Amino acid sequence: MKETLKTLVLVFTLAFALGLSSCNPCEDVSCQHGGSCVKGDCECPPNYWGAFCGEEKTPTKVLIQSVIVGGFKSTNQNGLPWDLTSNPDVYLEFYQDNAFLGVSNSLENEDPGRTRTFSGGNLPIELNPLKLVQIRVMDYDTPNDRELIFFEYLSPYTRGRDFPTQIVGAGMSINVTYVHE
C-alpha cells in the first residue's frame, strides 16, 4: 500500500509539473507589427497600440528628410527656356495650409530631364501629419525673379499604410521619418 501511495504521489507530482511547464500564457497570443508577448500581453513597438498591436498610433509630426524630383519640362508656360543662357537653378518651397514652412537647398544649372535629390537647406521640414503638404519646384534667378516649374500635393501620413519611409507622388517622392511623442 505504501508503494502504491508513493507511486501515485510521484505520478501526480510529475503530471502537475508537466502541466505547469507546458502552460505558456503567450502560446495563443499573436502580436502584430513586431510586438512581443510578455506574460500573455503584447508589448507594442512605438508606432502601434492595441491588444495585439494592430492599431497604428497617429504620429505627432512627420519630418521630410529629402525629396526626389523627376524630370520636368525644359520650357516655361510661355514656351521659353527657364534661363536664357543655362539650365534652371532649382530649389523647393514647402507649404501646409498656405503657410510657408521652408526651402530646400538650391541646385544650379539643372538638366530638366534628370532626376535629382534635395536634402539640404531647411530640411528636415516638420509637417502636421494630417494635412497635405504642397511642394513647389522653383526656378531661382534673383530674389525678385523666381518661377514656379510645377508643384505637387502629398499626404505625409495615411492610416493603414504601416509608416512607409518613402511617399511617392506623380512627379516626386519624399523620404520621411515619423515622430511619436
Image (cartoon, rainbow, N blue to C red):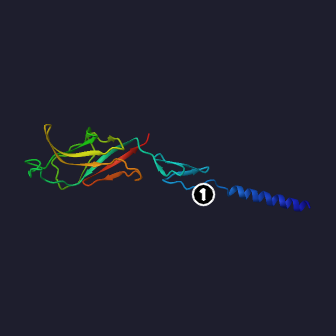
Residue 26: where, in percent of width, then height? 60, 54
Residue 107: where, in percent of width, then height? 20, 46
Residue 152: where, in percent of width, then height? 25, 49
Which residue is painted at 25% across and 46% down in the image? 135
Which residue is painted at 43% across and 42% down in the image? 180
Secondary element at image label 1 = loop
Q: Name the amino acid type tagged 1.
A: Asp
Which residue is painted at 26% across and 45% down in the image? 134
Q: Nearer the viewer, residue 88 or 73?
A: 73
Q: Image check: 86 left or right of 175? A: left
Q: Image check: 31 left or right of 9? A: left
Category of crowding for the residue at label 1, using alpha-carbon neighbours closer than 10 angstroms: few (below 14), some (14–19), many (at least 20): few
Number of numbered discs present? 1
> Badge 1 is on which residue?
28
Residue 100: where, in percent of width, then height? 26, 38
**The C terminus lies in which quarter of the figure?**
top left
Q: Residue furthest right?
A: 1
**The N terminus lies in which quarter of the figure?**
bottom right
